[in-house]
Amino acid sequence: MNTNDTSSHISTSPGAIPDVSTNTSSLIPSTTSVSDSGHSYKNAVREYLGKGLRYVVPLVISVCLLIWLFHKVNFHDVVTTVKDGCNFCWIAVMMLLTMLSRMIRGVRWGLQLRAAGVKRMPVVCEWVTIWGAYALNIVFPQLGEAWRCVFVSRREKTQLSTVIGTDVGDRGSDLVVILVLLGVSLVVAHPFISDFINRYSLGRDMRDITDDPVVWIGLGIVVGGLWAILHFCKTMIWVKRLDTNLDRIWDGFKVIFTMKKWWLYLLLTIAIWVCYFLQTYVVFFAFPFTHKLITDPHMAYGLIPGLVVFVFGSMSMAIPSNGGLGPWNLAIMFALSLFGISNTEGTAFSIVMWSCQAIMIIALGVFSAIYVSTTSGKGGDTTQNTSTSAAKA
């Protein structure tokens, strides 16, 4: 053994004093490595906790609201109402409209993607991105949006941020339409809403809250505080992230306004929302208690209650849940109650409509999974780990 090697080892001879002069650094734990290890552990815990909450919280909301719902109604009466009075031919029409609306939505998103520089995809692939996203959202809320963005990004070999921007713009245009429809429904249904407020204690309580100046002052303080934080704390990490997200939203909107075929985008948007409305309206024909609304000229032959029910249901989708289960059902019940429909009847209406829509969406999701797994060539080798990447997004 040469002299260079002997200096790096501790003597093991009997009675010898170990030479540790050159090895003390290896015997003392590195504070840097311990710190990095602890930091990584905390980040991992925070990441998994965030992912868990993303899926657990919507599930808890759905379950709790459904438990509350079935405590308010007699489930046996609901089943009897469905068995004795539901015309499932109209439900089948609703399911076909559910498929059609998602097909049009896929074509519209494809138009938006091409405007952002993404190559044209086969029309079936455009449908699949929407069908698969909606199916995933029933099981794992928000995972569907991440999946379709990752799928398109990998398939077309384009920047994920570009695809996400179009997705945000796609959802942003929906928000604009919902707000417009909300304003219209509040105007046309004002007499029915006023009657509800005057008739029920819940309505009077809601009126008292909205008429209280303290509520509006508090809301103004909250909005002003948020503006101040965003304005004076621009160097904070979460503020920078928010600015980045807002820029991404704006980029998504810019594509809409700068695309050459903006008129086609507008027509497709109208077609999507007409289909969405008709999905609700045709179910009015399926039950005797709602069929009477479409024969009443004072109700604009069901158009007014149909619009109100549709808008309330659309707004409830903002609440995190599994495909709207729970919040959507309660919103539909409340909207129908404005027109004299009982809780039992409203529950039957909402359960049948949601369940049959879910069946159609899941069936389309299965088709999407088969399409993705069997697509060869360009799309076949880029979608192998799409679901895993989407879960991390």
Image (spheres, helix red, strand yellow):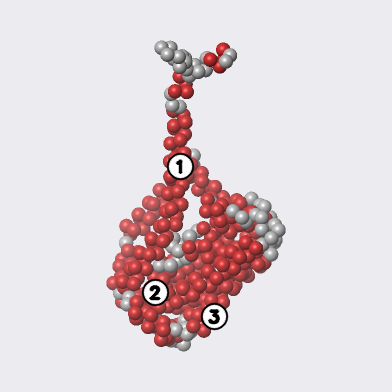
Residue designated by label 1: 43
| Gap in angstroms between the C-alphas marked 1 and 3 | 49 Å
Instruction: Say which residue appears at 57% left-offset and 73% top-offset.
Output: 99
167 to the left or right of 179 = right
**Tag 3: amino acid:** Val
Instruction: Say which residue appears at 45% left-offset and 17% top-offset.
Output: 12
The residue carrying pointer 3 sits among few (fewer than 14), some (14 to 19) or many (20 or more) residues within 10 Å by Cα, namely: some
Instruction: Say which residue appears at 48% left-offset and 64% top-offset.
Output: 138
Residue designated by label 3: 93
- Label 1 or label 3, whichever comes before in sequence order: 1
**Tag 1: amino acid:** Asn
Residue 61 makes an appearance in the image: yes
The residue carrying pointer 1 sits among few (fewer than 14), some (14 to 19) or many (20 or more) residues within 10 Å by Cα, namely: few
The residue carrying pointer 2 sits among few (fewer than 14), some (14 to 19) or many (20 or more) residues within 10 Å by Cα, namely: many
**Labelled disc at residue 333:** 2
Residue 72 figure quarter: bottom left
